[in-house]
Amino acid sequence: MRAGYVEEYKFVNSELGVPQGGTLSPLLSNIYLHDFDIFMNEYIKQYSSTEKYISKVNPKIANYSKKLTILHNKYIEDRNPDVLKEIRLLRGERNTIPSRIRIGNRINYVRYADD
């Protein structure tokens, strides 16, 4: 198996790299990438969260939900159009806020060798 590449429809010999389809290429790739695997495992230990959940409900959303529940019950009782307008305004404000807050990061690392 010759190492090389194709340029402008012509095969060009190369002394660099690992020949494609060779029996040694997976072994050599694993040897070459072993140090990178160790680095990534240490990086994951240092920066990846170990908690089950990496986000939580935004407390501002909970406050808006409480206010909306109170206003909804008030509207059911007296059908006041001003209360309905206030409900619409609060829903619009609530929709501009993220519903969850990120409290951690989860890092996944997958490596595979392929020709």
Image: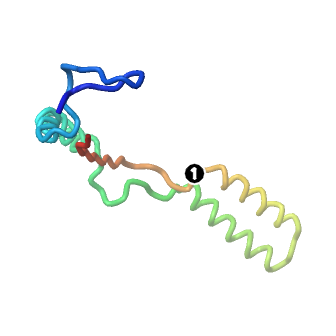
* Left or right placement of residue 102 versus residue 78 in this view: left
* Left or right placement of residue 64 versus residue 37 in this view: right
* Depth check, front residue: 75 or 102: 102
* Depth check, front residue: 92 or 4: 4
Dot 1: what SS? Answer: loop
Q: Residue furthest front?
A: 10
* Depth check, front residue: 61 or 42: 42
Rendered view: 106 above or below 70: above
Q: Amino acid at mark 1?
A: Pro
Q: Which corner quadrant of the image does residue 69 belong to?
A: bottom right
* Left or right placement of residue 56 versus residue 17 in this view: right
Whole-percent x, y for residue 78 in the image: 85, 77
Residue with the mark numbered 1:
98
* Depth check, front residue: 22 or 57: 22
Q: Which corner quadrant of the image does residue 83 belong to?
A: bottom right
Q: Which residue is found at the position 23% from the left and 38% from the top?
A: 43
Rendered view: 37 above or below 59: above
If the image is split into quadrants, where does the C terminus sit? top left
Rendered view: 101 above or below 4: below
Q: Which residue is found at the position 31% from the left and 46% from the top?
A: 107
Q: Which residue is found at the position 36% from the left and 59% from the top?
A: 53
